[in-house]
């Protein structure tokens, strides 16, 4: 029993108020305070647990990296990767952006998720094949699993040492010493581009770079009207450059700066978001050349040739430009080598045409034969709708003036055009008699093409040309498909059916 402190009446210890005076006891008030404190503390603990779980979730780490790259936020990227000045965050940001970001995001999510579940470290690669990030599992507050990320020792810069994005030089100095300059447009903004020797830059505040690259050259950009030019990321060129070896190219709307090293290799830059960006060829920084020659084809393709590897002959390589990812991808290789019948002779002829005629290039898969193409055959057209059997050759030449050869073959006279197209015509009436297309220009494989064409009228082996031929009739026209003995499509020929 306890005594009420108000009236002195005896009350039970578990009673919350006095039955005599009806006053509440302090025990109830104290109990409620304790209960309230417990509830608040529980809420704080639960909320803290939730917040820590969110902060340590693997997808949170990945999202911070991804958002920093997408938003071009150098500081955020430096924070999440704990760079601490160990690497130029601007250079790293450019490098990480140079890949398919949604795919990179998925790779990071998968790696982080695996680490969070099983604790085994996971490495993520850049699109160029270089390992760049490693994810490991740790503990936060000794209780919560968390995913940590660390940047590996990656190579970002070109052969020259890395340079700061803040290297600026007065325009007067650039104008006075540039061995090459040009106006470049990026969207609505006009820039001036300058190429000059590092040794001519006494005011450039990168003394170590200048000392280590005497004889090297540098790329600068300046916005029109600005008083300073900016040394570009990876803008130190580690080989001697002559003005004649600096060239500009275009593929559609994309503008390229090309620097040719001793006529043996090509390095390309293009403009992206106000900076010059070096173009990679499936991870390689340069393309091998012969006589410093390269061809840009139909706003999409690039072609070069070089000596065949390990064999006597030549290899022609065609690359396709991917504007979305700002890079070239190898599309096709064609080799002419001594181990193949007439390989050297054919290769010598291809090299001669390639060197002498700007319009010529070795055919590569560009055109696809489809079910719809069967209707064109009946109308006297072969894959393309711009030239038809019986059409005056003079009319053809009005729209196709880029022929590279005009000669006789097997008793007929022809014009040869880029893309593996050849048109024969009658010398007397001047009308087209044959349409021919190189098999190398087709994307179809032999089995695919035969399935589309159906059963031939007849077929057989040609001893003279060492080829196997299939013959088809389409209305008044005849199609001949020639293949080599290894199954490679040699050519397609369309002509009027001979009764």
Image (cartoon, helix red, strand yellow):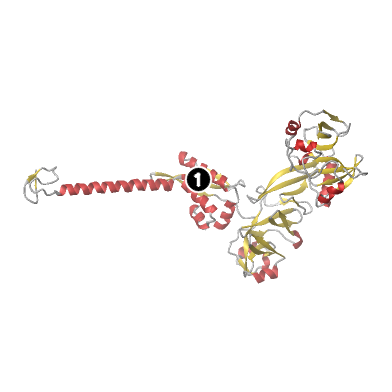
Q: Residue drawn at (78%, 36%), measured in percent from left and top?
A: 489
Could you tell me which quadrant the C terminus lies in?
top right
User: Could you say which quadrant of the image residue 204 lies in?
Assistant: bottom right
The foreground one among 262 and 470 is 470
The residue tagged 1 is: 135
* Residue located farthest toward the right when viewing the structure as drawn: 428
Q: Would residue 47 be found to the left or right of residue 251 on screen?
A: left
The foreground one among 226 and 111 is 226
As displayed, is residue 225 above or below residue 310?
below
**Crowding at label 1, few (<14), some or many (≥20) Cα neighbours within 10 Å?**
many
Q: What x and y, as percent, mark residue 261?
A: 73, 56
Q: Would residue 59 be found to the left or right of residue 469 on screen?
A: left
Could you tell me which quadrant the N terminus lies in?
top left
Q: What x and y, as percent, mark residue 81?
A: 50, 52
Element on which disc 1 rests: strand
Could one spot residue 273 in this view of the protein? yes
As displayed, is residue 328 above or below residue 220?
above
Q: What x and y, as percent, mark residue 491?
A: 81, 38
The foreground one among 111 and 395 is 395
User: Could you say which quadrant of the image residue 346 lies in?
Assistant: top right
Could one spot residue 310 in this view of the protein? no
């Amino acid at each position: 029993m306890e005594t009420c402190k108000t009236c002195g009446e005896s009350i039970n210890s578990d009673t919350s108020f006095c039955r005599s005076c009806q006053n509440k006891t302090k025990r109830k008030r104290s109990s409620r305070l304790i209960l309230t404190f417990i509830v608040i503390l529980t809420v704080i603990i639960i909320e803290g647990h939730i917040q820590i779980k969110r902060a340590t979730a693997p997808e949170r780490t990945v999202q911070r990296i991804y958002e920093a790259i997408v938003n071009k936020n150098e500081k955020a990227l430096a924070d999440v990767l704990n760079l601490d000045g160990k690497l130029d965050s601007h250079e790293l940001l450019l490098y990480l952006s140079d890949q398919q970001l949604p795919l990179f995001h998925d790779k990071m999510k998968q790696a982080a998720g695996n680490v969070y579940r099983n604790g085994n470290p996971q490495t993520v690669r850049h699109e160029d094949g270089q390992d760049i990030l490693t994810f490991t599992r740790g503990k936060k507050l000794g209780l919560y699993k968390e995913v940590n990320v660390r940047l590996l020792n990656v190579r970002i810069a070109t052969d020259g040492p890395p340079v700061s994005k803040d290297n600026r030089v007065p325009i007067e100095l650039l104008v006075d010493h540039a061995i090459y300059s040009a106006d470049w447009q990026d969207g609505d903004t006009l820039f001036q581009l300058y190429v000059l020797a590092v040794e001519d830059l006494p005011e450039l505040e990168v003394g170590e770079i200048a000392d280590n690259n005497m004889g090297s050259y540098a790329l600068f950009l300046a916005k029109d009207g600005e008083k300073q030019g900016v040394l570009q990321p990876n803008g130190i060129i580690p080989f001697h450059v002559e003005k004649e070896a600096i060239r500009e190219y275009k593929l559609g709307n994309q503008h390229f700066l090309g620097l040719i090293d001793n006529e043996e290799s090509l390095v390309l830059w293009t403009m992206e978001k106000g900076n010059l960006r070096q173009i990679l060829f499936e991870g390689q920084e340069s393309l091998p050349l012969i006589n410093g020659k390269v061809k840009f084809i139909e706003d999409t393709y690039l072609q070069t040739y070089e000596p065949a590897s390990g064999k006597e002959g030549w290899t022609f390589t065609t690359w396709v430009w991917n504007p979305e990812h700002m890079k070239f991808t190898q599309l096709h290789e064609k080799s002419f080598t001594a181990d193949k019948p007439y390989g050297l002779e054919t290769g010598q002829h291809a090299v001669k045409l390639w060197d002498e005629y700007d319009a010529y290039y070795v055919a590569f898969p560009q055109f696809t034969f489809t079910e719809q193409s069967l209707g064109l055959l009946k109308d006297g057209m072969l894959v393309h709708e711009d030239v038809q059997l019986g059409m005056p050759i003079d009319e053809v030449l009005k729209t196709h003036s880029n022929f590279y050869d005009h000669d006789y073959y097997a008793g007929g006279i022809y014009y040869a055009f880029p893309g593996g197209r050849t048109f024969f015509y009658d010398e007397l009436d001047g009308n087209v008699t044959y349409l021919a297309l190189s098999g190398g220009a087709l994307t179809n494989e032999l089995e695919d093409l035969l399935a589309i064409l159906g059963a031939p009228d007849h077929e057989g082996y040609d001893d003279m040309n060492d080829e196997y031929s299939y013959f088809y009739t389409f209305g008044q026209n005849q199609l001949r498909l020639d293949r080599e003995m290894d199954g490679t499509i040699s050519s397609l020929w369309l002509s009027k059916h001979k009764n």
